[in-house]
Amino acid sequence: MGNAVGLLELAGIASGYQVADEVGKHATVDFWLADTICPGRFLMIVSGDTASVTVAMEMAEVLGKDEVLSQGILANIDASVFQVLTSPKGLPEGRAVGIVETLAITPAILAADGAVKTAQVELVELRIAGGMGGKALVCFAGAVDAVQAALAHIEHLIEPAALANTVLLASPHPDLLAHWQ
């Protein structure tokens, strides 16, 4: 996977496949994901060099027209974002936990990347759309001040209309951690 990542969430599934098909035919990018997500949406994640991803996302935005729900480009995504997306780590005991709830997928991925690049936090979970009504959830752990710094950065990074909530659990109850996933 290239360093740059393009993210596009569409309201239409059929049009999502059509957009992905055209992007695949006309842009030099690799698909990380191009599939349906809950609740009846389509998510496309492509990677490659920054220029190619930018071209692909500009094309996708034009083709997707009024169905674009969220979009973004990360020129140098942190590897831990995709690692935790495919293999969540679970919440550790004895550390503060930051929780970010977004109203779409792209803002959550941007938040996850922003958190690990801003503060000494460990990304532990990134849930996208499955059974959450199109929302997404980012969880990270670290010292209280690091988690606070990451949350503050995210509150400035993500548009308020896309951010449902941010929460700091300074000392999470062990029973909550045991039942987390």
Image (cartoon, rainbow, N blue to C red):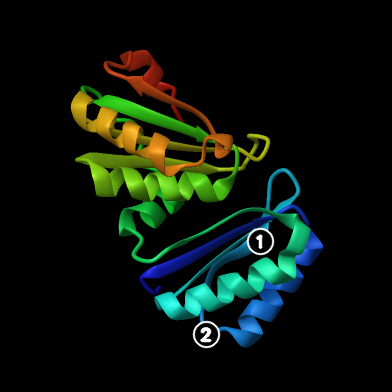
Position above or below: 116 against 95: below
Percent across and percent down for residue 40 are: 76, 48
**Distance of mark 1 from mark 2, alpha carbons?**
19 Å
Query: Is 11 situated left or right of 30 in this image?
Result: right
Percent across and percent down for residue 138 are: 43, 38
* Labelled pair 1, 2 in contact (Cβ < 8 Å): no
Query: Which amino acid type is marked by label 2?
Result: Thr
- Picture residue at 57% right of the left edge, 76% below the top: 56
Residue 143 shows in the view: no
Position above or below: 171 against 27: above
Query: Is 4 situated left or right of 96 in this image?
Result: right
> Which numbered marker is on residue 66?
none
Percent across and percent down for residue 3 are: 36, 70
> Which numbered marker is on residue 35?
1
Quarter location, residue 104: top right
Q: Is mark 2 on a helix, strand or loop?
A: loop
- Picture residue at 39% right of the left edge, 74% below the top: 2
Q: Which of 109 and 132 is in front in this view?
A: 109
Residue 65 shows in the view: yes
- Picture residue at 51% right of the left edge, 65% below the top: 6
Percent across and percent down for residue 59 are: 64, 75
> Circle 2 is placed at which residue position?
28
Q: Nearer the viewer, mark 1 or mark 2?
A: 2
Query: Which amino acid type is marked by label 1?
Result: Asp
Q: Which of 90 and 134 is in front in this view?
A: 134
Q: How crowded is mark 1: few (under 14 residues within 10 Å), some or many (20 or more)?
A: some
Query: Is 81 situated left or right of 62 in this image?
Result: left
Query: Is 148 situated left or right of 133 in this image?
Result: left
